Amino acid sequence: MSLRFRLIALMIMALAIGLAFGGAVTVLNASRSVRTEMRSALLVGQQTVENFVRGIDASADPQRDLDRLVEAFAGNRHLRISLIGGSARAEVQPVDDRPPFGAVPRWFTRWIGVRRQSYSVPVTIGGRALGTLVIETDPRNEILEVWDELSGSVLVLIVFAGATIPLIYLLIGRALRPLRRLAAAMEQVGRGDYAIRVGDRLTPELARLRDSFNLMAARLAATDADNRRLHEQLLTLQEEERNDIARDLHDEIGPFLFAINVDIANLTRLLSAGRDDDLIAPVQSIAEAARYLQRQVRGMLGRLRPIGLAEFGLAEAIGGLVEFWRRRYPEIEYRATIAPGCAMLGDQIDTVVYRVVQECLSNAVRHSRPRLITVSVDRDRQLGDIVVEVADDGSGVAAEPALGYGLIGMEERVSALGGRLRFANRPGGGFSVSAALPAAPRAVPAAAAMERAR
């Protein structure tokens, strides 16, 4: 069922509930009103009969006066009067009203719940009984009047509803038209068209929905553009990496493989000639070439994947980095602290932490001329983030350093996991780089990452 029909159905339901409540209140009020009317009519009848009975002794023809009294009640809508006993019987019924909406249903009469009441007055003259006047209430006409009023109200409500519901249908359709346009715009967004915007003048509630949709579409458009740009960068980096690997294989691996083939050919020739004493030089040459190839392959693998990170964990991998630079710069003091809860943080976080420490150590030893480099990996107790900090006591950097590929690369790696990267000169001298990574990595749009970088 559409929203329009649901709203109309709810309105009809509300009208029906209101009608039922109003009907119940009307029935309760009508029941009290009918009882009051019957008591008043009976009281008037009693007073009339009692006044007549008190003055009947002075009547010249009491019987005739009795008949006239009974006939005087003709046309009364609420009382039935009858003379019982005596020489004759007289009775007057209430005048029935014409029902414009049909006879009163029995269930409605039961709902009103007004019973008939009667009052008897014996008539005697000189000890002789002339009969008994019986007055009885008849609530039919009063109930009929209530039924007519209620039926008229229901009929007016039905006519009003029949006239207004089509109008409400049209007005609701007009009011829901912006929602249809929003739905169509969302379908376009679902098909990948993020340039769509909704600019209608709407009510405050729908205006907030429109503004939220436009903001969502703008962010999706920015995210889509960033994803395309990052995808292009990824393809470019992949091609560059493949070209580097191909160049290394061609320039470094290829010549040594060729040399090994030459040495093997020389070995074969010397063996065939029986010159065993001359085999030592070709064998040593092959061994040297194999060791060189092994070093080159390990270097290539280190660029593709940090050595030892998956096998031994983050602490061992960072220790290997520190040891690598300690062998080359023994005059620098290195202090590395890895918190016990940060030894294994997951493949993604471990890789980013390793790359941040790797880049920071490389920058420090090459540019800052430090005496001390500290590496710290700990967990923020309040936020639960992983905090990586690399600091040195060297010369620091210029007031506004130009972002090189190393810092940009670190920023993109950290932001891709929803983290934050900060770097600045230390007050006492030196340079500090700090990265905060969420314990559970979350993807962040590239636009937000670049905004943080700026």
Image: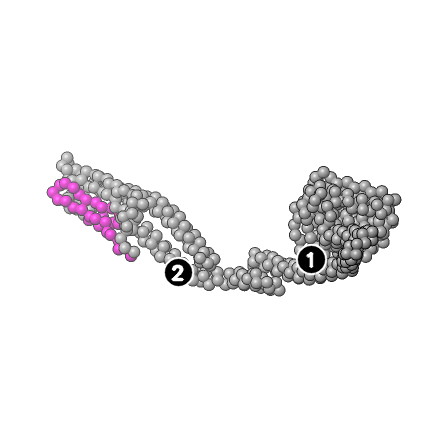
Q: Quadrant of the C terminus?
A: bottom right
Task: Provide the residue designation for mark 1.
Answer: 447
Residue 182 position by quadrant? bottom right
Marks 1 and 2 sit apart, C-alpha to C-alpha, by 56 Å
Q: Give the percent coordinates (x, y) of residue 137.
A: 25, 44
Q: Residue at x 76, y 51 (%)?
A: 294
Q: Residues within 10 Å of mark 2 (few under 14, many from 20)?
A: few
Q: Residue at x 43, y 55 (%)?
A: 9
The residues colored magenta run 71-100
Q: Nearer the viewer, residue 36 or 337?
A: 337
Is residue 94 covered in magenta?
yes
- Mark 1 or 2, which is nearer the eye? 1
Asked whether, in this view, residue 155 is left or right of residue 74, the answer is right
Q: Residue furthest front?
A: 274
Task: Provide the residue designation for mark 2.
Answer: 162
Q: Nearer the viewer, residue 10 or 265?
A: 265
Mark 2 secondary-structure assignment: helix
Q: Residues within 10 Å of mark 1 (few under 14, many from 20)?
A: some
Mark 1 secondary-structure assignment: helix
Q: Nearer the viewer, residue 111 or 353?
A: 353
Residue 271 position by quadrant? bottom right
Q: Residue at x 39, y 56 (%)?
A: 157
Q: Residue at x 19, y 41 (%)?
A: 133
Please tell me whether the stretch drawn in magenta is mainly helix, strand or loop: loop
Amino acid marked by disc 2: Gly
Up the image or down, 128 lies above or below 264; here it is above
Q: Are marks 1 and 2 in contact (CB under 8 Å)?
A: no
Amino acid marked by disc 1: Ala
Q: Residue furthest top?
A: 127
Is residue 245 covered in magenta?
no
Can I make out residue 342 in this image?
Answer: no
Q: Quadrant of the N terminus?
A: bottom left
